[in-house]
Amino acid sequence: EIPEENLNHAKNFPNKQVFILEPLNFYNKDSLRQESEEEQKNIQSEIIKTYTELGHEVVMVPFMSVSKRAEFIIGSLSS
């Protein structure tokens, strides 16, 4: 369940592009990643679904180096 305050913020966010990073090609549960790989996939699917339903353009950022991801995002913003 998404808190109403978060949902309202997402609805009114001025930038209609939302960038979602493709998952890493490996997955390890650790102190920061508490979810299983399957849970992580389900969460990402729900995030994509929600942003799409709110009218945002979801842009998937492929798995690559941090600098390449940054270039990809900057290039997407200027187009």
Image (tube, helix red, strand yellow):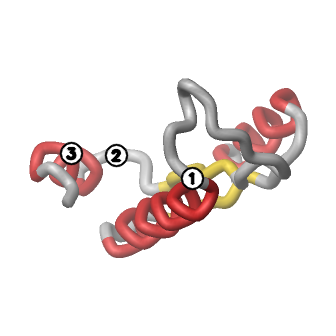
Disc 2 element: loop
Left or right? Give the position of 10 relative to 18: left
Left or right? Give the position of 32 relative to 23: left
Q: Quadrant of residue 78?
A: top right
Which is more foreground, mark 3 or mark 1?
A: 1
Residue 39 in the image: state x and y as whole percent.
51, 59
What amino acid is labelled 2 in the image? Pro
User: Which mark is first along the chain, 3 or 2?
Assistant: 3
Which is more foreground, mark 2 or mark 1?
A: 1
User: Which mark is first along the chain, 1 or 3?
Assistant: 3
> Eyeballing the image, is 8 above or below 33?
below
> Which residue in the structure is indicated by mark 1?
36
Residue 17 in the image: state x and y as whole percent.
51, 54
Q: Which quadrant, please, contains the C terminus?
A: bottom right
> Eyeballing the image, is 15 above or below 32?
below
How far apart marks 3 and 1 lie (CA) works out to 24 Å
Sort mark 2 into few (<14), some (14-19) or many (20+) by Cα contacts within 10 Å: few
* Count of marks placed on residues: 3
Do the residues bearing badges 2 and 3 touch, measured as CB atoms within 8 Å? no
> Eyeballing the image, is 43 above or below 76?
below
What amino acid is labelled 1 in the image? Ser
> Which residue in the structure is indicated by mark 2?
14
> Residue placed at 46% from the left, 59% from the top?
43
Q: Nearer the viewer, residue 36 or 73?
A: 36
Question: Which label is found at residue 6?
Answer: 3
Q: Which quadrant, please, contains the N terminus?
A: bottom left
Disc 3 element: helix
> Residue placed at 55% from the left, 55% from the top?
40
